Image (cartoon, rainbow, N blue to C red):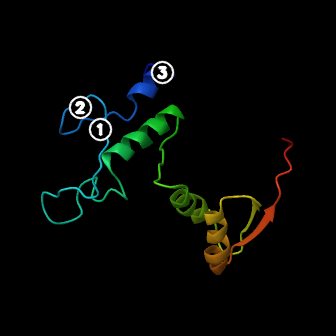
Amino acid sequence: MAMVRFSTRAIHSGDREDATGSVAVPIYQVSTFRRKQAGLEGEDLYARTSNPTRTALEAALAALEDGERGLAFGSGMAAITSVVLSLLSQGDHVVALEDLYGGSRRLFDRIMCNFGVSFTYVQDSTPP
C-alpha cells in the first residue's frame, strides 16, 4: 500500500458515507438514533456512547497519529474517568500536580480513594 501523505490523511481520514450524501462529515446534533427494529443492533444508539461525527473524528485522530484507534470525549472529566482512572487498580499510587483541575482532584479525593487508590500532590518545579 502506498504511503499516504499527512495532508491527505488530515483531510480525508474519518470520511464516511452518510444518508445525506454530504462530502464532509456533518455534525450530528441528535441524542438518539432511529432503530429499524427493537434491540441494540447497529453502530449508533445514543449520542453519548457514539455518533457519526465523533466516530469520524476518532478515525481521523488515529490516522493522523498512526494509531489503531482514537478516542474523543465530551469533557475532560469523561476522558480522565474513562481512560486514565480505568487503568488504576487497588493499591496504586498517583502523583499529580498540586494545581490540577479542581474536578479531577475532587474525583481523586472523594471517589477514587474509595477504591484503594492513593494520591500525592506536588508543585510544578518547571522554570517559567
Q: Which residue is mark 3?
A: 7
Specify whether 25 is left or right of 99: left
The residue at the point 52 percent across, 39 percent down is 67
Whole-number angstrom distance, CA of label 2 to CA of label 3: 21 Å
Specify whether 21 is left or right of 75: left
24 w.r.t. 38: above or below:
above
* Quarter of the image that includes the N terminus: top left
**Residue 25 in sight:** yes
The image shows a total of numbered marks equal to 3
**Numbered circle sitting on residue 26:** 1
Q: Residues within 10 Å of mark 1 (few under 14, many from 20)?
A: few
Pointer 2 or 3: first along the chain: 3
Kindly indicate whether the residue at mark 1 contacts the one at mark 2 (C-beta within 8 angstroms).
Answer: yes
Whole-number angstrom distance, CA of label 2 to CA of label 1: 7 Å
Q: Which residue is mark 2?
A: 22
The residue at the point 47 percent across, 44 percent down is 69
Instruction: Give the residue type at disc 2.
Output: Ser
Whole-number angstrom distance, CA of label 1 to CA of label 3: 20 Å
**Residue 4 in sight:** no
Q: Residues within 10 Å of mark 2 (few under 14, many from 20)?
A: few
Q: Closest to the observer: 67 or 8? A: 8
Secondary structure, mark 2, is: loop
Q: Quadrant of residue 112?
A: bottom right
Instruction: Give the residue type at disc 1.
Output: Pro
The mark closer to the camera, 2 or 3, is 2
49 w.r.t. 114: above or below:
above
Residue found farthest to the bottom? 114
Kindly indicate whether the residue at mark 3 contacts the one at mark 1 (C-beta within 8 angstroms).
Answer: no
Secondary structure, mark 3, is: helix
